Amino acid sequence: MEQSKIDRINELARKAREQELSEDEKKEQAQLRREYVQAFKNSLISQLESTYIVDEYGNKKKVQRNTKGENE
């Protein structure tokens, strides 16, 4: 996610603490938050896909993705 979008999320959060956001600002904030969460999830998934577990015998095993409850 671009730094400018993160800066805008923070700007809207500061403004929301000081005063009520307009409907357009609330929609923008919600959209930016969704984008941020999705970018975070994608980054974490990418990181986990390149992660291996090493057992006590030195055997490497790739971390498997658990698809159960994936939409939670």
Image (spheres, rainbow, N blue to C red):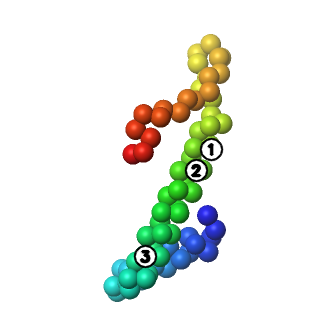
Distance, label 2 to label 1, CA atoms, is 6 Å
Amino acid carrying mark 1 in the image: Ser
Distance, label 3 to label 2, CA atoms, is 23 Å
Badge nearest the viewer, 3 or 1 = 3
Q: Which residue is mark 3?
A: 27
| Residue at the image position 65 percent from the left and 17 percent from the top | 58
In x, y percent, where is residue 49?
Answer: 62, 37
Residues at circles 2 and 1 in contact by the CB criterion of under 8 Å: yes
* Quadrant that contains the C terminus: top left
**10 Å crowding of disc 2: few (<14), some (14-19), many (20+):** few
Quarter assignment of residue 2: bottom right
> Disc number at residue 12?
none
Q: Which residue is mark 1?
A: 46
In x, y percent, where is residue 6?
Answer: 56, 70
Quarter assignment of residue 19: bottom left
| Residue at the image position 38 percent from the left and 86 percent from the top | 22
**20 relative to 62, above or below:** below
Question: Tag 2 or tag 3, which sits nearer the N-term?
Answer: 3
**10 Å crowding of disc 3: few (<14), some (14-19), many (20+):** few
* Quadrant that contains the N terminus: bottom right
As helix, strand or loop, the secondary structure at mark 2 comes to helix
Distance, label 3 to label 1, CA atoms, is 29 Å
Amino acid carrying mark 2 in the image: Asn
**6 relative to 23, above or below:** above
Badge nearest the viewer, 3 or 2 = 3
In x, y percent, where is residue 24?
Answer: 43, 82
